[in-house]
Amino acid sequence: MSRVSPSSVDGWETAPCALLTLRADGTVLEANALLREWAGRTPEELAGLRFSDLLSVGGRIFWETHLSPLLHVDGRVEEVALELRSPTGRTPVLMTAVVQQPDGQVQVALSGARERSRYERELVAARTAAERSAQQVTALQEVTAALSGAVGVDALTDVLLTASTGPLGASAGTLWLSGPGGLEAVGSAGETGAALPEAGVLLHERAPVPDAGRVVVPLHGSAALQGVLSLVAPEGGGDDPLDLEVLTAVGQQAGLALDRAHLYEQSASVAHELQRSLLAGAPPVDGRFSVATVYRPGVEMLEVGGDWYDVFLAEEGVLSVVVGDVVGRGLGAATAMGQLRSAVRAVAGPGVGPARLLSRLDRFVEQVEAAGMATLAYAELDLATGLLRYACAGHPPPVLLPADGEPSLVWDGRSTPLGAFVHPQERSEASLQLSPGDRLLLYTDGLVERRDRSLDEGLELLSQAAAQVAAAPLGEAVRTLTSRLLVDERGRDDVCVLLLSWAANAFERDLSADLSGLAGIRAELGSWLSQRGADEVTRQELVLAASEAVANAAEHGSGRRSAERVTLQARVVARTDGPADVVLQVRDHGRWRTPTASEERGRGLTIIGALVDDVVVEAGEGTTVVLRKQLRRATA
């Protein structure tokens, strides 16, 4: 029985799709009119060609390496996208092929796919646009949320620099903000030393400006240019370019956020100054005592609350220290606290004493309703003798930290809170004799009270923590003790802690490593040395040596970070073989790094060694520099 030629089948030649018959090796046997039209070839030109000769380069490779082997294994392939070559270009088609048995000829049908290809391209373009839009929205949401949550200019600076190399997609960035002298660089991410953009252009531009591989984003506020964010475009070939639409929106939002931040900081500065005026000012200067405090209000965004402290001279040579707690929280409690603090200062004076002071305050709080039921611990220290008289009105007991011995709670001199419905006609007081180096801790209940434990447990933990820091410098001791006791805190409450040390003959000061208080401490040390009888030359040399040692400790041990602390201690040590010595100790919490000498800096130890008799650097947990110099006394 003979095979019927496809061309003899009715409609084969005029079929609406291109048809071919191939030998088993892919050689074209027959092709209908549409195939000849698409290929731009006559029947004679098609004779002897392989099917792969009609395809684009990619299609040819795909046919020879994948489709032809698969066809002869499975006997059929369906709707495979290929491109036919023609004199006028390429024609996208979908191929279906079937192997006929037993001669192995292949029947191929090709349908036009130009509309389908265009649809697929449009679909890919639409998907790409949707993905880009989603990425834009995600980036904007992320940056907007961060800008909304930032409080203050410093926080906004961190947000913008983090976003630069994050959701904004830059490889690096630098931020300039407007200041008194124009645009000032305030930070960078992934680069240093970026050049300042042309400010004149940016004053008028609202959209990002491409600039030599960078994109400069002006940050305009409602009335003026608040800053400039300069971003480095990604360098990798596969990285997406910086999205100017997103950067435009971010620039607008960041400019307005900077407006709000400046306004907030101005308002906060005024509020903070008013609040600080309610707290104690600087304590009196006297080498016979030292005071360190920690204060933390229970309400965020307030500098003060209902807890308070004060240190002042009740009379010449008598130091008053007080810690109190007004009922309530927030601004109302802070206002009552300020009134009560002023009342304590007004009532205290020669001959009054702790008990009578509390009795007079009872009458005061009857006139100030918000101060009713306030608690208070008040003490007066005779700086010459170390005699401490104290009284507590419903307040947690002070803690005595002797120079030698274990801490103990001080339970005497107690009575009811101020303005209580039932209070004694005469308040009680008690006294303690302090020895040099003894310390007294006053605090408010927020330090020890918790809902999940008894007050006795809290006081026991306080005594244990006090014992662990008894030998530490005063400032370090009060900070460490407070942080340890508040580590398990579940709710915020006002906390005020005051640690008083009577030294008689010693001097101790604690200052920030940014050296903001160095000038005042130099003056205090000079006064202390004068009180010890030091002559002018000795005083000047020791003050200069101490100042240089503190500066070195701040820089080399603490990196001038404001959160770090440097402690200066001074004492007079008697000698059996001659005049007494002045011993200075400067302690930091970092590691001393001996600087490289230069014409400008790095000669700290050399200078110190020329001013004193002996210098010892003790490295360990932190670094302690010990200076010793003979006390030459002024002549009468």
Image: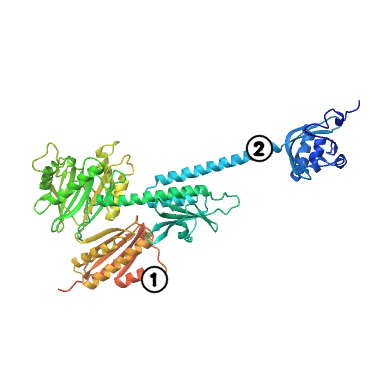
In the image, what residue type sits under mark 1? Glu
**Residue farthest along the bottom direction in this orientation:** 635
| Discs 1/2, front | 2
Q: Name which quarter of the figure residue 619 lies in.
A: bottom left
| Residue that carries the numbered disc 1 in the rendered image | 600
**Secondary structure type for disc 1:** loop
Query: Badge 1, how many Cα within 10 Å: few under 14, some, many 20+?
Result: few
> Looking at the picture, does residue 454 appear above or below residue 318?
above
Relative horizontal placement of residue 262, taking residue 122 as reference (left or right): left
Disc 2 marks which residue?
119
The colour scheme used here is: rainbow
Type of residue at label 2? Answer: Tyr
- Residue 5 coordinates in the image, percent (x, y): 87, 30
Q: Is residue 630 above or below residue 334?
A: below
Q: Is residue 150 visible?
A: yes
- For this view, does 5 lie left or right of residue 481? right
> Percent from the top left, x then y, of residue 632?
21, 72
Residue 364 relative to residue 577: left or right: left
Residue at the front extreme, as displayed: 204
Q: Earlier in the sequence, mark 1 or mark 2?
A: 2
